[in-house]
Image: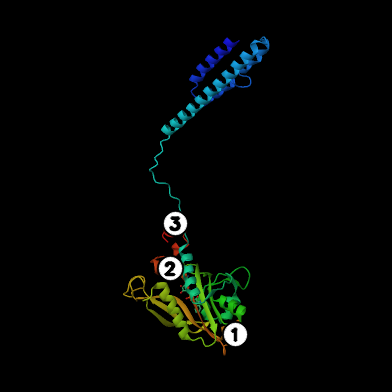
Amino acid sequence: MIEQLDQLYQDALTTLETAASTAVLEAWYRDTLGRKGSVQLLTRQVGGLSPEERPAFGKRVNEVKEALQQAYDGRAEHLKLAEIEAAIARDTLDVTLPGRSTTHGNLHVATKTLREIYKIWADMGFQVFRSRDVETDEYNFELLNIPQHHPARDMWDTFHTLTPGVILRTHTSPGQIHAMRTYAPEAIRVILPGMCYRYEQITARSEIQFHQVEGLAVGKNITFADLKGTLTSFARRMFGEQRKVRFRANYFPFTEPSAEMDVECILCNGNGCNVCKHSGWLEILGCGMVHPNVFRNGGYDPEEYSGYAFGMGPERIAMLKYGIEDIRYFWGNDLRFLEQF
Ligand code: FA5
């Protein structure tokens, strides 16, 4: 039986040498050293041996098992390395190739401009006060000194909802009344940012939805000089310290007196170009001293309080700052435009 065992050992070693894949190797293990493998089967025949022969056979069986296990381990290691080498040769990897870059999202140019505006006003002590996009006719017009059938309503073409008297706000000015009714009789310094909606012809300069940032300062002894000084500081921080500004008289029903502020054209430095229509100036906002009727509607006594308000369009400001020719790019969802900012 020992000869039989040695023969088995020799044969198993020879087959192991030729095992060329992990699958063949595993099959060899199962057939040779496995629970029902040839070595195990031979071991079971130990019962047929005489008691004297048994120890020598047992010892030889253990030696053979150990030697085969070692041979198996060696072959397995060899095959593993060979397979790795083959894989490397097959899938050549060029470690000098640059990695694939991932795309980063970025803030919308309108959001960036809004944040820049918030920061400048925050530095001057103005808090953000938010009010709703859907307003009543009363807040959007009447409380701002624009009664029904007043001709000034033509200044703001309105989107109406199916509910009578409920509209999409045409400007952020109704926020002035909300802020006054919240804070009266305290002093106020707030900016009121938000989306506005107008039933207008869409053109290169006008959208039907756009942002505005309203501002409101209420207190005692606030004068037109405060309005001019604060807005001039804002323009210098936004467009450059040397930038000239000018105020032109204008009309808004909720301020008296009212004005529009122009900045020296930032594209041609006031020399005249297509963007400023060769005037050298660009209009950036409307403003004025809060009208006594608006004060009364907000809960302040106009004999005691004064204040100023202004309203600017961040998209128009961004157009000037970055030389954007058409406002329709803002909501056109064209990545080629959006990725530039
Ligand atoms: C107003 O809406 C006033 N409520 C501003 C105001 C507030 C005056 C407080 C006095 C006191 P106006 O219609 O001019 O004014 O709009 C203000 C700014 O919003 C404009 O200067 C412009 O920058 C922007 N704007 C107006 N209409 C559009 C539009 N269709 N598309 C893009 N921006 C617009």
Of the numbered discs 1 and 3, the one sitting upstream in the chain is 1
Tell me how far mark 1 sits from mark 2, CA to CA.
35 Å
CB atoms of marks 1 and 2 within 8 Å: no
CB atoms of marks 2 and 3 within 8 Å: no
Where residue 218 sits, quadrant-wise, is bottom right
Where residue 235 sits, quadrant-wise, is bottom left
Callout 3: 10 Å neighbours few (<14), some, many (20+)? few
Q: Which residue is mark 2?
A: 318
Tell me how far mark 1 sits from mark 3, CA to CA.
48 Å
Q: Nearer the viewer, residue 215 or 47?
A: 47
Residue visible at 54% across and 17% down?
A: 12
- Label 1 residue near ligand 1, CB within 8 Å: no
> Which of the numbered marks, if any, corresponds to residue 300?
1
> Which of the numbered marks, if any, corresponds to residue 22?
none
Residue farthest along the bottom direction in this orientation? 303
Q: Is residue 94 left or right of residue 183?
A: left
> Which of the numbered marks, if any, corresponds to residue 335?
3
- Label 2 residue near ligand 1, CB within 8 Å: no
Judge whether 113 appears above or below 338 on screen.
below
Q: Amino acid at mark 1?
A: Tyr
Q: Quadrant of the N terminus?
A: top right
